[in-house]
Amino acid sequence: MNKKNLTMLCDYYEFTMANGYFKNGMHEKNVYFDVFFRKLPDNGGFAILAGLEQVIDYIKNLRFEAEDLDFLRSKGVFSEEFLDYLKNFKFTGDIYAIPEGTPVFPNEPVLTVKAPAIQAQIIETFVLLSLNHQSLIATKANRIVRAAQGRAVVELGSRRAQGADGAVLGARAAYIGGCQGTACTLTDELYGVPAGGTMAHSWIQMFDSEYEAFKAYVELYPDDPALLVDTYNTLKSGIPNAIKVFKEVLLPMGKTKCSVRLDSGDISYISKKARKMLDDAGLTECKITASNALDEKLIRDLMMQGAQVDTFGVGERLITSQSSPVFDGVYKLVAVENALGEIEPKINVSDNTAKITNPHFKKVYRYYDNESGKALADELCLYDEVVDDSKNHTIFDPNATWKTKELYDFTARELLVPIFLNGECVYESPSIDEIAAYCKEQVELLWDEVKRFENPHNYYVDLSERLYEIKNILLSVHKV
């Protein structure tokens, strides 16, 4: 697909609704939509938000080409007046979002749109697919990185990704989540995520012997070469041949940086044996990389077993988030403006209580404990509420009328920041390195109990008293 303009990457019902809004004179009515998610991948304690930069680029390029309008006309259901309206279509509304790399939690707005109804409706599909995909991969990457306990993690999954964008943007998201690099060259070219790699088994098989293959490679790339040592027999030939080549080629050049890669077998056992062989040969600076269908649970087990691995290469189980492959972000109407410009809250009520929405135009506060610096809770407030963190503060559990939490000695920080105002981008996207560093810093502000892989602590996402009351009033109005 080489279509740069992605405005038509849109669920068809967005167009049928937009045409209906136009025919009913509702197309200029300002509406408010929240993006939020209900369930955390892998039953974890938090997610990492990613994909905002692509949303920004998409909004900047919103437009309909003549060929797009011809296609819509061919469907035979859209009025000419509506199609004429789309000729000069552009986004003129406001968008507020939580910055990329921020830990986020279920049921809180990670992005809010205030815009005329047609504009807000048409952007839904792309906004969701961008945030859902990259947040999923960034979250998985962060779990894997935390399991590695300080060892480097590199993303290797391009060939198993779901399509080109899955590979390229997945590697971008993995870097935000904490990976130190990628095998995807295009992600390096486009986004500056460091690309690297070793060799395939085919390189070694092209030569008459493993030794000759290693020697030719190290002579070509003497600066920190990495050798794949399991083509034939890791401990009987791979490691010995690597040692021989490193000593013959690198040491006379005064170079000691090098590595070997294990891609099969019992990684724990083999890595310990390989480490001893390398150390006994005087190659104490030679690093060991391990790959082969790894994820956070396998890596955690390897760490518990004392595996001698310096870098983990993780492929399909990261780039597809294999164990939990869907991020369930949704896009829900929460308010509309009436003829007087007043904001009227809206709520979606369901027999499934998990699908009941939090109404109104909102802001999100995160509260930090002044003594430890750790995040205590998030609070959803009305857009015009201001929290005074010099006073004790009470937040309300949205699921229990009797349950509140008292906060004291804390600092309040607003999470949603302006991205677009009146259609103009007012946000300068950080560099990929800045986003990754920010993500690491923010994850460290979470309590260890929230970061557990199994049965993590349920982080508080509560409502202000005013929002809690409005929600209850709307629930009583719509009670069947």
Image (spheres, rainbow, N blue to C red):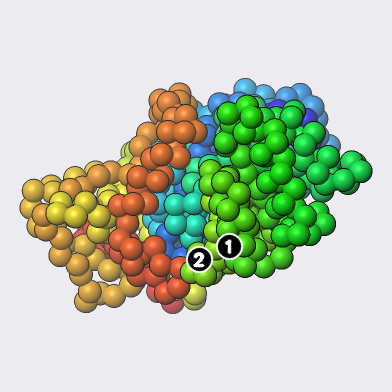
Q: Is residue 387 left or right of residue 44?
A: left
Element under disc 2: loop
User: Residue 57 appears at what percent x and percent y?
Assistant: 57, 29
Give the mark nearest the N terminus, 1 or 2. Answer: 1
Element under disc 1: helix
Q: Residue at x 62, y 62 (%)?
A: 273
Name the amino acid type tagged 1.
Lys
Q: Residue at x 65, y 33 (%)?
A: 250
| Crowd rating for badge 1 (residues with CA inside 10 Å; few <14, some 14–19, many 20+) | some
Q: Is residue 241 left or right of residue 340?
A: right
User: Residue 461 appears at what percent x and percent y?
Assistant: 32, 61
User: Residue 34 appears at what percent x and percent y?
Assistant: 45, 50
Question: Can you say which quadrant of the picture contains the N terminus?
Answer: top right
Marks 1 & 2, CB-CB < 8 Å contact:
yes
Q: Residue at x 60, y 66 (%)?
A: 268
31 to 309, vertically: above or below: above
| Crowd rating for badge 2 (residues with CA inside 10 Å; few <14, some 14–19, many 20+) | few
Q: Residue at x 57, y 37 (%)?
A: 257
In the foreground, 277 or 124: 277
Image-quadrant location for residue 451:
bottom left
Residue pointed to by mark 1: 272
Name the amino acid type tagged 2.
Gly
353 to 327, vertically: above or below: below
User: Residue 401 appears at what percent x and percent y?
Assistant: 25, 74
Q: In the rendered image, is residue 132 in sight?
A: no
Residue pointed to by mark 2: 306
209 to 377, vertically: above or below: above
Q: In the rendered image, is residue 416 in sight?
A: yes
